[in-house]
Image (spheres, rainbow, N blue to C red):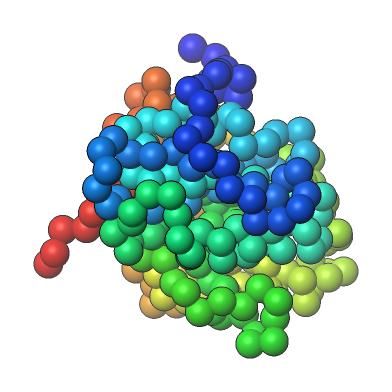
Amino acid sequence: MNSREILTRPAPPVDHTLRYGPLPEQVVDLRLPPGPGPAPLLVLLHGGFWRPEIDRAHTGPLADALAASGLLVAVPEYRRSGWPDTLDDVAAALDLLAGPLPHPVTGRTVLAGHSAGGQLALWAAARRRLPADSPWHGEALPDAVVVLAGCSSLERCADWHLGDDAVLGLMGGAPARYPERYAVADPAALLPLGVPATLLHGVEDDRVPVAMSRDYAELATAAGDLVELRELPGIDHFQLIDPLTAAWPAVRDTVLAAAHPVPR
């Protein structure tokens, strides 16, 4: 199977689309779980190296499979036009999802993100670490974060020139030029998050190397966060978000464990 096939595979239509702003990108798709009862909320932030060419549509098969597993799945779209639009939109979408929704929720929220969306999920979990006068500051904490092949360090994205220097488009330039931007947008600079995180990463990933998650896990653990890294042999970057691949059981089980933790 061509692992990039997931980028164009169609999915069933969404159940609801909410709007958090007037622009075309400022929407959130909702996929409902089976049955009318309350469900945990999973906010799934898509990747694409923060560029406009890849939007939320490619998450449809994964989001649909996770909703069928019993979760209320929200997939925000956001502007992929660089600083500060992307962060503005993710913060606004999260604020919207903290309010009333068209399906009852259990009160438990998990943030998940793939690739560039992994950076956004970790950053969203760290909003209380931002200065109180920041437009992105927020006190609400998710209950857990699941990161799939995440760009968990913007500084390393820049140093390693990932995605043909994609992070420079997000941030407007390199860390040396805008250190103050990286200080408030890089999850690795905002540790400790104070939220349990599970990192899944395919060992065969040639777009975001597994070393990214290894380094973040080491930094986060040293800072006092509860972090688990699960490396998946034989899995590449896009197989991780495809429910038809061997990665799916690990992804499903990790997300469901975050949404339904077993009491200790």
Q: Quadrant of residue 137?
A: bottom right
Question: Is 176 or 239 nearer to us in this picture?
Answer: 239
* Residue 240: % across, % down: 46, 33
Q: Residue shown at 79%/63% (left/top)?
A: 84
* Residue 77: % across, % down: 64, 45
Is the C terminus in the top left, top right, bottom left or bottom right quadrant? bottom left
In this view, 117 is above or below 236? below
In this picture, residue 59 sits left or right of residue 19: left
Q: Is residue 107 visible?
A: yes
In this picture, residue 127 sits left or right of residue 81: left
Q: Quadrant of residue 205?
A: top right
Farthest residue, direction left: 264
Q: Is residue 158 visible?
A: no
In this view, 7 is above or below 250? above
Farthest residue, direction top: 1
Q: Residue shown at 38%/53% (left/top)?
A: 41
Q: Residue shown at 82%/50% (left/top)?
A: 81
Q: Residue shown at 33%/61% (left/top)?
A: 108
Question: Is 51 or 39 nearer to us in this picture?
Answer: 39
* Residue 236: % across, % down: 50, 30
Q: Quadrant of residue 17?
A: top right
* Residue 122: % across, % down: 53, 61
Farthest residue, direction bottom: 132
